[in-house]
Each structure stands twice: as structure tokens, then as C-alpha cells.
Amino acid sequence: MKDKKVLGRLGEKLAASLLRRKGYKIIAKNFQRRLGEIDIIALDGETLVFIEVKARVGRKFGLPEESVRLWKLKVIEKVGAYFRLLRPETPESQRIDVVAIELDEYGKVLRQDLIKNASG
């Protein structure tokens, strides 16, 4: 699986399925602004959650979650603040989660992890 867009779409589909199984209610996908994008926005109980999805084939470049850097978390915070302006009815409590997905070269899922409160 070499096409990054295909990998990204597959990762987001798998992540959405995982989140639903864990009880999250997805309210937006691929929320974009000039600053950047949030892959998935969901509710986990009374908490608004901004979710970054990272899918990788193999570990040549490290684990998927290792690629979520501080600058990306800051972008998610800024884009999330804009989302909250548009949707003031959302809960005050919020956090950033990461879904890390490892696939083999045929697209078979080797690992899916939900990392809550990735920003600390």
C-alpha cells in the first residue's frame, strides 16, 4: 500500500469504527481550515474530542503515534478553537486523542491503539 491518500482514507475509516465501538459519537470528519485539519471530531460522554489518525505500513519510519509532534497538537488546538466558535453548544471539556494504526503491506490491521489525552 504505497498511496498515501488511500492509506489515509483507510486509516480514518478504521479509526471511526474503533471509536464507535468504544462509545464515541462522531460529529465531524476532516474539519479543515487554513491552519490545518482535524481528522475526526467526536463526543466521548460529555467531552469534546479532537482526534488525529495516524496509519502506517511497517515500522521503517517508527510507530504511527511517534509522528504526532507538538506542532501538530498546537494546530489541532487552534483548529479546534475555531470549531468551538462555530458549535458553541459543544461541551466545555475537551481533549486530543490519537488513533495509531499499523498495517501490513496488504492492508491487514496489525495494531490499532486509542491514545487518550495525547496533549498531556
Image (cartoon, rainbow, N blue to C red):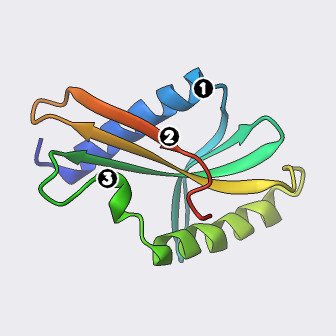
Q: Which residue is mark 2?
A: 114
Residue 13 in view: no
Task: Point out residue 66 in the picture as x, y percentages from the top left corner.
Answer: 34, 61
Task: Point out residue 3 in the picture as x, y percentages from the top left corner.
Answer: 15, 49
| The image quarter in which residue 20 lies | top right
Query: Looking at the image, is mark 1 or mark 2 earlier in the sequence?
Result: 1
Query: Looking at the image, is mark 1 or mark 3 earlier in the sequence?
Result: 1
Q: Indicate the amino acid at tag 1.
A: Lys
Q: Check the image and report above or below for 104 versus 48.
A: above
| The image quarter in which residue 80 lies | bottom right
| Mark sitting on residue 105 | none
Q: 10 Å neighbourhood of mark 3: few (<14), some, or many (≥20)?
A: many
| Mark sitting on residue 22 | 1
Whole-number angstrom distance, CA of label 3 to CA of label 2: 12 Å
Q: Which residue is mark 3?
A: 64
Q: Indicate the amino acid at tag 3.
A: Pro
The single residue placed furthest to the front in the displayed view is 120
Q: Secondary structure at mark 3?
A: helix
Q: Secondary structure at mark 1?
A: loop
Q: Secondary structure at mark 2?
A: strand
Q: 10 Å neighbourhood of mark 1: few (<14), some, or many (≥20)?
A: few
Q: Residue at x 72, y 37 (%)?
A: 44
The single residue placed furthest to the top in the displayed view is 21
Q: How many marks?
A: 3
Quadrant position of the N terminus in the picture: top left
